[in-house]
Image (cartoon, grey):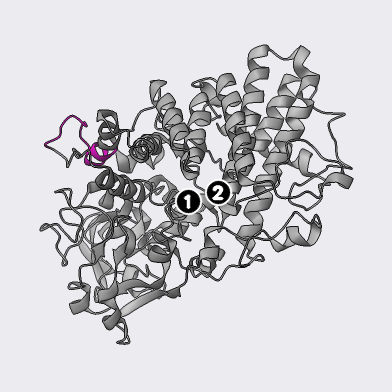
């Protein structure tokens, strides 16, 4: 896919010169245009490659999707970013990330519209296979961008052709109508796209991408019959499968595996990600900025399959002991052995009294300064995110080439399970889908039911709680949590109140009250409230977070309202 990345940059320079700065990047009026382009198969490939670039919108050098989790209950962004503003409930129509996401997705839609309108000029000189594939890719990308837009903003203008300037100010289209368009486009794309690619085409949208995206957007909109059918269609392709090692899935070892259904690659000197610098520990040259919350950590089950409020295995002095292995594979915390600058490995500890930690290699073993604690900006929660951190990237920690997965097979399995649960069509296939995901976390086969806490219940309410918890922990840090919170209508419970960081005294660090978890695996930290009144007990991340009913949608960017004077182009309620 590296070839795709390189060609994206070149064609973006070509297509975007002279574009107006409005929500559709509407009309190239003084740059090379459709009269001089789209004349060959190679030019069609360049054009569709450009439309892929809008998948990779970045915020603070992270893929936007990782940052999106920091607007939810499972992640927090330290450095006063827009994600923190949204998490606090202080965002407005002028918040930058809300404006940038809108314009980025509409820019991608505009590229797809232009390509689909003009690609017939190259039909006679392009092979039918390539021509149909590019048509499918463009339709997939346009549908994907619209699916994201309605999931964040609700009703949005549905534009499926290039509009002249005089007609460019349009009303918002009802969300249901846009969703119907998304489903139709994804069906068309699935019919035209191959199941897989080889060589430098690996990473392009595939039949599985179209079906999985349809399943996702159907689930987000309570179209459970469509979600179940589309996710089952992905399963029935018999191509995608779970990568055997959950931790390694998010390193170069798992890149472009069969679990990856849609991903965006990076290439040094062209476009890179700064996972390692932003997420890494201080001893590894990182900034510890995007960090897991205690609310995420407390949501992992114990190895007996019980939540921490019900399990006798939970130990407040070592919260990582006897826990779902995915907790250690996702979260860097006390007791881990980790890699740092200069080739060292060391014992991780975030305990506030730990001014030193143990260096294991290179020999000899020794005590070294523990900047994970002593640095003023060390992790506020006492945890860091392991996903997308590979030791290879320590060399150039701002220039990772590691592909970011936008859709993967584990999500499809959980989508299938949730859709069937909500339809009350519960059978062995539902349990199989959930257990495949759970067993992989333990590194065992799903059939080895004595080696992991397999799900056996057929009770709808119990399974609903299980699959919601599975999505929370399995997909943490991948940008899906905000959408789940919205569709389950749990924002008021999950987001309101003080966001507690790590305890700052030894006694408190090892004796915090055990929270209770509700049916959505949202911990209740009422027992912390009396403790927070004592200055110095906690490092506080947000105080308080505030989630109101209007926050189930983002506002329409003010810059768009200022430009588009159509009376049907209105603001979302409450903003």
Mark 2 neighbour density, 10 Å: few (under 14) some (14–19) many (20 or more): many
Toward which corner of the image does residue 55 lie, by quadrant? top right
Q: Specify start and end residues of the magenta stretch as a single range.
A: 437-450
**Quadrant of the snapshot with the N terminus:** top right
Tell me what residue is drawn at x 16 percent, y 49 percent.
303
Tell me: 236 left or right of 573.
Answer: left
Q: CA distance from mark 1 to mark 2?
A: 7 Å
Q: Residue at x 62, y 25 (%)?
A: 136
Q: Is residue 382 above or below residue 100?
A: below
Magenta segment includes 34:
no
At which x and y percent is residue 562?
Answer: 78, 62
Quarter of the image holding residue 346?
Answer: bottom left
Q: What percent of the width, then of the height, locates residue 46?
A: 70, 30
> Of label 1 and label 2, which has the lower sequence position?
2
* Residue at point 57%, 45% (across, down): 148
Question: Do residues under tags 1 and 2 come within 8 Å of each other at their CB atoms?
Answer: yes
Residue 121: which disc? none
Horizontal side, residue 93 vs residue 429: left or right: right
Q: Quadrant of residue 245?
A: top left
Q: In the image, is 397 to the left or to the right of 566?
A: left
- Would you say 304 lies left or right of 541 here? left
Helix, strand or loop status at disc 1: helix
Residue picked out by circle 2: 151
Residue tagged 1 = 483
Which quadrant: the C terminus?
A: bottom right
Q: Is residue 441 magenta?
A: yes
């Amino acid at each position: 896919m590296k070839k795709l990345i390189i060609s994206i940059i070149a064609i973006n320079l070509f297509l975007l010169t002279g574009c107006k700065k409005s929500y559709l990047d509407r009309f190239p009026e003084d740059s090379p245009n459709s009269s001089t382009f789209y004349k060959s198969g190679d030019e069609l490939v360049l054009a569709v490659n450009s439309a892929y670039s809008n998948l990779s919108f970045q915020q603070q050098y992270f893929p936007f999707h990782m940052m999106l989790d920091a607007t939810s209950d499972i992640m927090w962004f330290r450095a006063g970013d827009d994600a923190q503003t949204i998490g606090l409930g202080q965002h407005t129509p002028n918040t930058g990330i809300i404006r940038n996401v809108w314009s980025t997705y509409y820019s991608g839609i505009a590229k797809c519209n232009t390509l689909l309108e003009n690609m017939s000029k190259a039909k006679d000189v392009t092979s039918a296979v390539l021509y149909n594939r590019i048509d499918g890719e463009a339709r997939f990308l346009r549908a994907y961008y619209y699916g994201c837009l309605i999931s964040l903003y609700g009703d949005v203008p549905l534009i499926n052709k290039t509009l002249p300037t005089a007609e460019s100010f349009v009303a918002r289209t009802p969300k249901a109508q846009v969703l119907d368009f998304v489903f139709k486009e994804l069906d068309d794309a699935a019919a035209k796209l191959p199941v897989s690619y080889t060589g430098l085409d690996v990473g392009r949208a595939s039949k599985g991408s179209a079906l999985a995206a349809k399943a996702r957007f159907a689930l987000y909109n309570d179209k459970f019959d469509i979600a179940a059918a589309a996710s089952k269609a992905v399963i029935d392709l018999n191509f995608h499968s779970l990568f055997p090692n959950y931790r390694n899935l998010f390193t170069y070892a798992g890149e472009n595996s069969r679990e990856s259904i849609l991903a965006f690659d990076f290439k040094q000197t062209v476009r890179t990600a700064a996972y390692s610098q932003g997420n890494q520990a201080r001893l590894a040259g990182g900034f510890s900025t995007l960090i897991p919350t205690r609310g995420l950590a407390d949501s992992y089950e114990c190895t007996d399959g019980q939540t921490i409020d019900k399990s006798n295995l939970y130990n407040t002095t070592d919260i990582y002991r006897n826990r779902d292995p995915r907790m250690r594979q996702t979260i860097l915390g006390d007791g881990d052995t980790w890699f740092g600058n200069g080739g060292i490995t060391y014992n991780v500890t975030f305990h506030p009294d730990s001014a030193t930690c143990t260096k294991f290699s290179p020999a000899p073993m020794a005590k070294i300064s523990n900047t994970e604690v002593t640095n003023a900006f060390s992790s506020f929660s006492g945890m860091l995110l392991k996903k997308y951190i590979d030791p290879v990237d320590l060399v150039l920690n701002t220039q990772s080439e590691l592909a970011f997965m936008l859709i993967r097979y584990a999500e499809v399995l959980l989508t299938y399970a949730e859709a069937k649960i909500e339809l009350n069509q519960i059978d062995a296939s539902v349990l199989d889908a959930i257990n495949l995901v759970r067993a992989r976390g333990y590194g065992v086969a799903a059939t080895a039911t004595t080696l992991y806490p397999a799900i056996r219940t057929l009770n709808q309410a119990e399974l609903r709680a299980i699959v919601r918890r599975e999505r929370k922990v399995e997909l943490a840090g991948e940008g899906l949590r905000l959408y789940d919170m919205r569709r389950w209508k749990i924002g008021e419970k999950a987001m309101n109140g003080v966001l507690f960081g790590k305890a700052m005294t030894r006694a408190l660090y090892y004796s915090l009250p055990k929270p209770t978890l509700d049916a959505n695996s949202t911990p209740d930290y009422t027992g912390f409230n009396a403790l927070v009144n004592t200055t110095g007990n906690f490092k506080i991340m947000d105080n308080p977070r505030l989630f109101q009913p209007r926050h189930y949608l983002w506002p329409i960017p003010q810059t768009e309202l200022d430009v588009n004077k159509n009376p049907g182009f209105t603001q979302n309620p409450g903003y």
